[in-house]
Image (cartoon, grey):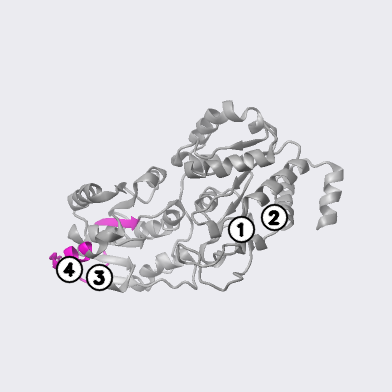
Amino acid sequence: MGRKFYPLLRLILYFSPRPKSDPAKRNFSRILAISTTAVGDTLLSTPGFTALRRLNPHARILALIRDRYASMFLNNPDLDGIIPLKKGWAGFIENLKAIKSENFDAAFVFHTSDPTPLGLAALAGIPFIAGKSLHPSFDAFFTLRTYPDYNRHTIERRLAIFKLMYPGFTDLPGRLVLPQKKEAADRIWEKLRPTVGCSLDQGPLVGLQPGASRIYKMWPKERFVELGLRLLAAAPHLSLFILGNSTEAALGQDLLDGIGAPGRVFSLCGKTRIEELPAIISRLHFLITNDTGSLHVAIAVGTPTISLFAATDPHSSGPYQDHERHIVISKPKPCGTNCVHKKCPHKPSCMTQISVDEVYRRAFEMLLIHTCRLDLQTQKRISSNQ
């Protein structure tokens, strides 16, 4: 629901009777896990789902996940099902009915950008609500709560509630969970074959993720173009795949037009479904990406990455597992502003600190790791630039 409904929601919650909760309760039989923002943020909550399953092995655990992304998490082994979060008052009522019908005895709030999911949990009469509080004005609806410590990685912030509730539980999970079946990946790539031709069989497949949720997190598209041109020159059999959603189709076309090379560069922006993204990324040799959802998908499915940070902090939202597979290129924020807000008060130029040469050198290392054939002159030229 829009923000204009928040005061009304607070009023409804204030006057709605709720069951008394026992802050000391630790064993639950029916649990709602709440993570209702974008793909990356929901993936960063999956260690929390794993923790819930380890601590409550026989419980029925469902997740409230934004409807457009819910299909990506249907195979999560720690969940018994998903309730898709829908928009508007009609969606709110539908969600409320679905949650009430499950008779949950606990809800864990891992991440949400608005209080609607908390309102759903409270109005559904869930007696025990724990997790990260969005704002002090909503603290009264929590049985146990934590506040985000932005000096820690996002995963650690999501798991903080378990340290509070279970001091002896030291085996906290940290891996992102996104199971993939080889057969499903094969089917998706076969569906793409008429578009990409024989590129799938000839050489390394490298992904480019030029978009992000905010412009201040985006490396300039002109630099992606220059990088693409240099990669194609370095590896004669390499193919580039530009990733993005339908709103990034124009950006993908700009890269496609700038790099050229028909038959070796392909834009998949807006051409695949969200649930197909993990299978696509799982077949890439590596992905060059901004700080966005595709980065976390790649980490989850085991695809190496080169991630670019300046406005955001990789210690907060960068790779948390398999560090040997992932290269992080990070620069300090020149303005010193804390970029946790959705709008940048400055002209967002901090990502221009990352040069094409720097990304190219690290990509070349990735190509060597994956045994790409490079002609001798190219190897000498790259070595002289290092």
- Tell me if residue 214 comes above or below residue 284 in the rendering: below
Look at 38% across and 56% down and name the residue there: 49
Report x, y in % for residue 232: 73, 41
- The front one of 325 and 226 is 226
Classed neighbour count for the residue bearing mark 1: other residues with Cα under 10 Å, few (<14), some (14–19), many (≥20): many
Q: Secondary structure at mark 2?
A: helix
Q: Nearer the viewer, mark 3 or mark 4?
A: 4
Q: Amino acid at mark 3?
A: Thr
Label 3 to label 4, Cα distance in Å?
15 Å
Look at 65% across and 60% down and name the residue there: 352
Q: Secondary structure at mark 3?
A: loop
User: In terms of sequence position, does the residue under pointer 1 or pointer 3 come before the other?
Assistant: 3
Relative side of 153 to 242, left or right? left
Classed neighbour count for the residue bearing mark 2: other residues with Cα under 10 Å, few (<14), some (14–19), many (≥20): many
Report x, y in % for residue 88: 26, 50
How many numbered marks have been drawn onto this rendered protein structure?
4
- Choose top left, top right, bottom left or bottom right for residue 356: bottom right
- The front one of 45 and 177 is 45
Relative side of 308 to 233, left or right? left
- Tell me if residue 318 comes above or below residue 376 in the rendering: below
Label 1 to label 3, Cα distance in Å?
39 Å
Label 2 to label 1, Cα distance in Å?
9 Å
Which range is magenta? Answer: 8-35
Query: Circle 4 is placed at which residue position?
Result: 14
Query: Circle 1 is placed at which residue position?
Result: 308
Query: Circle 2 is placed at which residue position?
Result: 359
- Choose top left, top right, bottom left or bottom right for residue 56: bottom left
Q: Amino acid at mark 1?
A: Leu
